[in-house]
Amino acid sequence: MGELDVLIVGAGLSGIAAAWHLQAKCPDRSFALLEARDAIGGTWDLFRYPGIRSDSDMFTLGYGFRPWISERAIAPGPAIREYVRETARVHGIDRHIRFGHRVTAAAWNTQEARWTVTVATAAGEQQLRCRFLFFCSGYYDYAQGHAPAFPGQEAFGGTIVHPQHWPEDLDYAGKRVVVIGSGATAVTLVPEMAARTAHITMLQRSPSWVVALPARDRLGAAVQRVLPRRAAHTLIRWKNILIAMALFQFARRRPQSFQRLLLGDARRRLPQGFDVERHLLPRYAPWDQRLCIIPDADLYKAIASGKASIVTDTIERFTAGGIRLASGAELPADIIVSATGLKLQMLGGARLTVDGEPVDLAQRVAYRGAMCEGVPNLALAMGYTNASWTLKAELIARYVCRLLNHMRAHGEDFCVPVRSEGGEATRPALDLNSGYIQRAAGVLPRQGERKPWRMLQNYLQDIVSLRFSRLRDGALRFGRAVGPRSDPTNHAGTRFVQQ
């Protein structure tokens, strides 16, 4: 049973960032990354459907410590995957990755101030021990997406696929394709596949908010031509952060104005007679769900070309040759793509216990969006819903390094967020009404109404919270492990350091 200072779970975008910051700020700590799959990249290696690309600009989705140097702000999935892999190679992080290691359980022992982590491998079950456990596995269920059963599905004579498990040999050239869904995956698939299909239809029960943005950052490209790489990257990154924050605030404070802006842009780009209100006006306000980006208005261009269309209706049943709608119309199809969303799970499905007691994260409150109440020496990399995931993931990685260095400097073994007795009311950690978020209400942690238990979803506020706030804030308790026979304890054999 090996023992390490830090175990990082996941070798995707967040895990590589965590390892880089750990090497840079805690260079004397031993660590390893446990990756369930056999490749670096996380979701960017898992998802291989046509046209997969970033849904945030790469100058902020990319790492702060390794500039994204392409002029493409919205990048294709293979380019992002290679960027993450190359980052791991360049910084020697790949040497610390243990592939084919799926974490199934983690048990904290307070008397020892250690995690015992159970891992499934091809060679059988193994156990590792560590002082600090950092989950960078995101919150997607990699095994399966959300795939509801439709009436008559077994009668369909064609092919049904889910984007999360795209067949490499699927030939859709000259075929009639129906994509069920209206989210980010659907608006990516439709314009990409339209060039080769006989016709492709996006079938939606209700629309999502869609925003057309340029794939290439022209201002960023100009800045990169005149400034040194590091300075250009910093300037472009902050430009994009502030613009995204301003647009989010505008959308939340003046939703009707933002709505008119998006619909007006759609009308200008789509053919005359296209029913914008029916097909592009959602039932919810902008940013009640994440906006769907269409780079260079590619979805609108596909519709204008006649190669793609949108149908807003509900499914009555599948037929041998397609889908019969509630309106009585039938959509012919050779291939049906069920872009019906994702399933969420925390910790990659691993079971968590603290001193023998099971931990249900859905009943715990997140602390600074980085830890969970009552769970010692464990951090979670959780990104933003209204900005690039990596912005928050890197802030959390830096925060973990602050904690590790602080505990070593003060001779302490663990830290644990503690809420006061009869704490304030809580609400879901992610304030979105997206289907996949609502379905995960019993999976995700909760948040409080005030700091430090509030999930801020604001990069500037999180900089203050995670980089510059006092670590000893009264909610985060520090302690030293002591033997089970020690007397002055107040937490299962652990002496808390009084604030």
Image: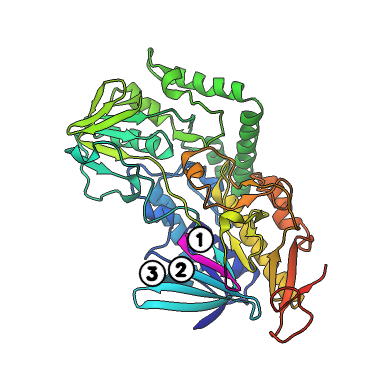
- Residue 103 disc label: 2
From the viewer's perspective, is residue 491 above or below residue 164? Answer: below
Q: Residues within 10 Å of mark 3 (few under 14, many from 20)?
A: some
Mark 3 residue type: Gly
> Picture coordinates of residue 489 (x, y %)?
76, 78
Q: Is residue 31 magenta?
A: no
Residue 433 visible in image: yes
Q: Nearer the viewer, mark 3 or mark 2?
A: 2
* 182 or 210: nearer the viewer: 182
Quickly name the residue at label 3: 100
**In x, y percent, where is residue 441?**
53, 47
Q: State the CA–CA distance, disc 1 to disc 3.
A: 16 Å
Magenta residues?
347-357
The residue sitting at 55% across, 49% down in the picture is 389
Local SS, label 2: strand
Q: Tell me which amino acid carries mark 1.
A: Leu
> Picture coordinates of residue 295 (x, y %)?
44, 34
Element type at mark 1: helix
Residue 381 showing in the rendered view? no
In this picture, residue 460 sits left or right of residue 168: right
Q: Earlier in the sequence, mark 1 or mark 2?
A: 2
Q: How is the image coloured?
A: rainbow
Q: How far apart are the alpha carbons under marks 3 and 2?
A: 10 Å
On the image, the x and y values in percent for residue 64 come to 59, 54
- 114 in relation to 40, above or below: below
Dot 1 and dot 2 residues touching (CB under 8 Å)? yes
